[in-house]
């Protein structure tokens, strides 16, 4: 009888370890997906802001007949805006308004307290 009880306790302990490792793997995958999403968003922000600056500068230069001056000014403005947006993304500035704060609250609510 004692041997059966020991076997049962070993199986329960093994199940608990397996369950926690599955939960850890899911958490790791979620963090990896969030990091990938943040990286893609940062890259897109940088490319779009620089591209918009170049297009606006080029258009103004053609329209006003002042060849490189507006292109250079708006290129630099686009680079500055792109890096500022990347800074905001990495520091989570401005993402607490609206839907992002609701998502964070839901994630916090789903976390079970660890014992």
Image (cartoon, grey):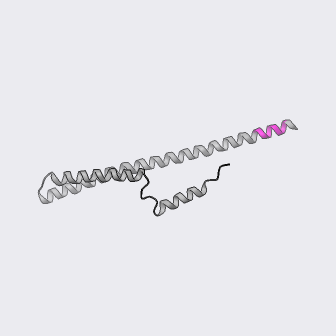
Q: Residue furthest bottom?
A: 98
Left or right placement of residue 43 versus residue 51 in this view: right
Residue 8 painted magenta: yes
Left or right placement of residue 27 versus residue 73 in this view: right
Q: Is residue 69 visible?
A: yes
Relative depth, front residue between 102 and 18: 102
Magenta segment, principal secondary structure?
helix
- The magenta segment is 3-10
Q: Residue at x 33, y 50 (%)?
A: 83
Say how many tags the image has.
0
Relative depth, front residue between 112 and 5: 112
Measured along the vertical axis of the image, is residue 47 above or below residue 17? below
Q: Residue at x 32, y 51 (%)?
A: 82
Residue 43, image x, y percentages: 36, 48
Q: Is residue 54 visible?
A: no
State which quarter of the image contains the N terminus. Answer: top right
Residue 107 painted magenta: no
């Amino acid at each position: 009888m004692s041997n059966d009880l020991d076997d049962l306790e070993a199986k329960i302990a093994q199940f608990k370890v397996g369950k926690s490792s599955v939960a850890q793997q899911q958490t790791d995958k979620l963090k990896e997906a969030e990091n990938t999403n943040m990286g893609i968003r940062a890259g897109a922000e940088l490319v779009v802001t620089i591209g918009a600056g170049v297009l606006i500068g080029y258009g103004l230069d053609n329209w006003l007949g002042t060849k490189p001056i507006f292109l250079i000014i708006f290129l630099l403005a686009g680079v500055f805006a792109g890096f500022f947006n990347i800074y905001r993304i990495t520091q989570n500035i401005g993402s607490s308004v609206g839907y992002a704060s609701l998502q964070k609250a839901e994630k916090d609510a789903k976390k079970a307290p660890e014992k």
